[in-house]
Amino acid sequence: MILEIVSPEASLFKGEITSITVPGVDGSFQILNNHAPIVSILQKGTVNIAATSFNFSKESVGLFTKLNDQNYTLAINSGTIEMKDNKVIVLAD
């Protein structure tokens, strides 16, 4: 599935991923390939991204924390997530 993370300042990431875990208002939840369509509000926490490879822009690479070659995290204060047709869009603060 495709993930796009956008902040008010810039587009932080766009690429193919295997899963994403986000901090929802009722607890963290994970989205995998072919997940049902969903729109949800996010709270302060950590977004965990799993993929086989990552390509970050020079401006955003310092915002992500590498856990290992296939997992990165991003701290957010709040946001919104939408999943539809195997495309995930995260609007993050």
Image (spheres, helix red, strand yellow):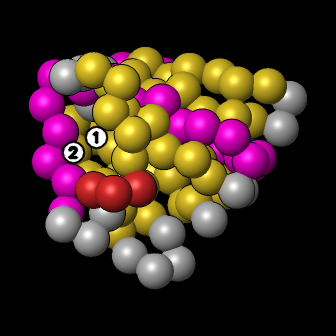
In this picture, is 47 found above or below 52?
A: below
Is disc 2 placed on a helix, strand or loop? Answer: strand
For the point 45% across and 36% down, the residue is: 73
For disc 1, the marked residue is 2
Nearer to me, 66 or 27: 66
- Type of amino acid at the residue the image marks with label 2: Gly
For disc 2, the marked residue is 15
In this picture, is 93 found above or below 78?
A: below
Judge the density around disc 1: few (<14), some (14-19), many (≥20) Cα neighbours within 10 Å.
some
Q: Quadrant of the N terminus?
A: top left
Q: Earlier in the sequence, mark 2 or mark 1?
A: 1
In this picture, is 64 found above or below 23?
A: below
Q: Which residues are magenta?
A: 33-57
For the point 60% across and 37% down, the residue is: 46
16 relative to 46 in the view: left or right? left
Q: Position of residue 57 (x, y in %)?
A: 19, 63
Whether residues under marks 2 and 1 lie with C-beta atoms below 8 angstroms apart, the answer is yes
Mark 2–mark 1 Cα distance, whole angstroms, equals 6 Å
Q: Position of residue 69 (x, y in %)?
A: 20, 22
Q: Position of residue 34 (x, y in %)?
A: 39, 21
Residue 36 within the magenta-colored segment of the rendering: yes
Specify whether residue 11 is in view.
yes
Q: Quadrant of residue 53?
A: top left
- Type of amino acid at the residue the image marks with label 1: Ile
For the point 62% across and 52% down, the residue is: 76
Nearer to me, 84 or 58: 58
Q: How many marks?
A: 2
Q: Quadrant of residue 30?
A: top right
- Mark 2 vs mark 1, foreground winner is 2
In this picture, is 16 found above or below 13?
A: above
